[in-house]
Every structure is written in C-alpha cells, then in structure tokens.
C-alpha cells in the first residue's frame, strides 16, 4: 500500500520543542489548524476542523516523549479512516529532523496526491512556527489547488 | 514499491503553459534549477544541476502535448537511477491540475522522505512561476532540512 512520506528539519531547535508542537492543542493549532481540540494522551482523541471542509478525528495510539507520535484517523474523509500518521524526531547537528509518514491508504487516488502535497505545506508551516514563531495553520494555510 | 505523489493546481492557466514549463529548458529553469540544459524531445536527455550537490541526467520517454510528460533518470544519486517521473495535466475549472508521480523507488529510505517534500516545494515553485511570473528554482529554492 502506498504511503505519504516527508522529511523536514527544524533549525536551532530541540526535539522537545517539536514534540510539544505535535502533542498539545496549542502547538497543533500553531501549524495545522487553529481549530484543534481534544486530548493528546494515549487513547485520547484530537479533533482537527477546517471550517466547512470538515476535518478529522484522530486517536492517539503512541507517544514517546521527544521521539515519536503515532495517530490513527477514526473519523473524516472515507479515504483517511483507519490510516495512521506518524512523526519520528531526532537531532542531527543543528537540526531537529522530523520524519513523517501517513500510511494505510488503500489506493493511490487523486485525493492522496493532494494530501501528500498538503502535508508538505503543513510540515513547512510546523518548521516555520518553530523557527520564526509564525506558522500558516488553517485558515491561513497555503492553498495548492481547487481542492484547497 | 513506494511512489512519491503530488497534486497542484495552477490558477487561471492553460495546460499549454504548464506543459511548456515542463518541456523547455527555459521553462524548467524557471522553477526547478536555473542550470538546466539538454533536449526535451523523446529520446533526448535533460541535465539538471544543483551546484556542488550534483544533479540528475534524465531521459525523456514520452511527451503528449499539453497532457503528459514521462522521464526516466539515467544518472544521479543511486536511489534515483532507473526511477521514473511523470506529470499529467488536465483542466479543471479555472485550474490546470498537475498530477505528479516519482515511481520506482526500491525502498522508502530517509532520502525518499526528503525528496518527497522537496518535490512538493518545487511544484509550488512551478505553480508560482506560472501564476505570478516568479518561481523559486535552485539556487533560490526553499530549503527544508540539513540535506537542503
């Protein structure tokens, strides 16, 4: 099954800061969508909303402080349900490296192409908020195409 | 085998303009790397260079005007050799949709994660040059991480 893979590096940052941006509503609101609620604890559910476009309910499956986050999508677009999203963090010189994977897609549909590019843009937003204090979460996200 | 997939939409543009940006050295220089040489004809080889980081020699396998471009990497980083890159274009309302695929990766190595994000950034550069006249080709490309 095809996966979406990405890698970004956050300059002059520690994995601790990046982990916080991935595991608190405040952090997630700063780079993905400003409408993020729920509980980031194992077994908890996070709700990410994008206005009229709907959103995702995501269950937290695994948390390893400053190293690893694993989620599973429990509600949202049909293609997303059951898929898993992971972030693995490591220090490499001056950078915190984020290895991202969105796995479990059944088919490489056109929507998956869109989501792959959109994840890249949001991960650049994560990098940006950690490096400069300014991210581009929804509704101020970078638009890609007619699917937004 | 895992593939890199992306989708961007170029607003108020025709597939003809996008096709030109994918099939002429001038066009490719405007969004990928300003050091692009070679011949964009079936059987021709394009050479993309990124200063000291080296680059790629890419053979043109298929060209269908305003619709489809297929390349195969013949020289460059080991992981890229033999892989294929395609661009499929279609009009969708006000947008020219670009469906991108980089296929034939043997393993989902960390470098593939990097290249996936980097392709997204370059495709946003393609979108930008067609919409605004200003792209971000190497050496003015958006940097992602310690691999650049």
Image: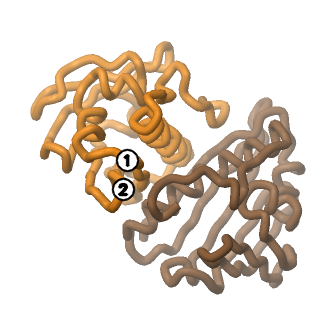
Chain colours: A brown, B orange
Q: Position of residue B125 (x, y in %)?
A: 48, 36
Q: Position of residue B130 (x, y in %)?
A: 39, 36
| Cα–Cα gap, marks 1 and 2 | 5 Å
Residue A33's quadrant in the figure? Answer: bottom right
The answer to whether mark 1 and mark 2 are in CB contact below 8 A is yes
Q: Circle 1 sits in a helix, a strand or a loop, which is it? A: loop
User: Callout 1: few (<14), some (14-19), or many (20+) C-alpha neighbours within 10 Å?
Assistant: few
Task: State left or right for residue A41 relative to residue A62.
Answer: right
Pick the residue in front: A111 or B49: A111
Pick the residue in front: B25 or A69: B25
Chain of the residue under label 1: B
Residue B29's tag is: none
Question: Does the rendering let one see residue A74?
Answer: yes
Q: Residue at x 27, y 38 (%)?
A: B17
Q: Residue at x 78, y 64 (%)?
A: A34
Q: Position of residue A99 (x, y in %)?
A: 65, 52
Q: Earlier in the sequence, mark 1 or mark 2?
A: 1
Q: Residue at x 42, y 30 (%)?
A: B31
Report which residue position mark 1 lands on.
B12
Task: State left or right for residue B123 relative to residue A128.
Answer: left
Task: State left or right for residue B53 relative to residue B75.
Answer: right
Report which residue position mark 2 lands on.
B94
Instruction: Find the residue positioned furthest to the left.
Output: B42
Q: Residue at x 78, y 41 (%)?
A: A91
User: Callout 2: few (<14), some (14-19), or many (20+) C-alpha neighbours within 10 Å?
Assistant: some
Dot 1 and dot 2 within a common chain:
yes
Chain of the residue under label 2: B
Quarter containing the N terminus of chain B: bottom left
Q: Position of residue B119 (x, y in %)?
A: 46, 42
Quarter containing the C terminus of chain B: top right
């Amino acid at each position: 099954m095809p996966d979406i893979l990405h890698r970004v590096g956050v300059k002059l940052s520690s994995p601790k800061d990046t982990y916080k941006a991935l595991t608190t509503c405040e952090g997630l609101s700063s780079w993905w969508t400003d409408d993020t609620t729920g509980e980031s604890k194992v077994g908890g559910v996070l709700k990410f909303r994008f206005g009229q476009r709907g959103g995702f309910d995501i269950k937290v499956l695994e948390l390893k402080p400053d190293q690893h986050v694993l989620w599973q999508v429990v509600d949202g677009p049909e293609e997303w349900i059951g898929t898993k999203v992971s972030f693995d963090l490591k220090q490499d010189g001056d950078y915190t490296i984020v290895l991202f994977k969105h796995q479990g897609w059944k088919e490489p549909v056109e929507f998956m192409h869109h989501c792959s590019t959109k994840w890249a843009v949001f991960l650049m937003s994560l990098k940006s908020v950690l490096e400069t204090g300014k991210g581009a979460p929804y509704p101020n996200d970078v638009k890609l195409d007619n699917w937004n």
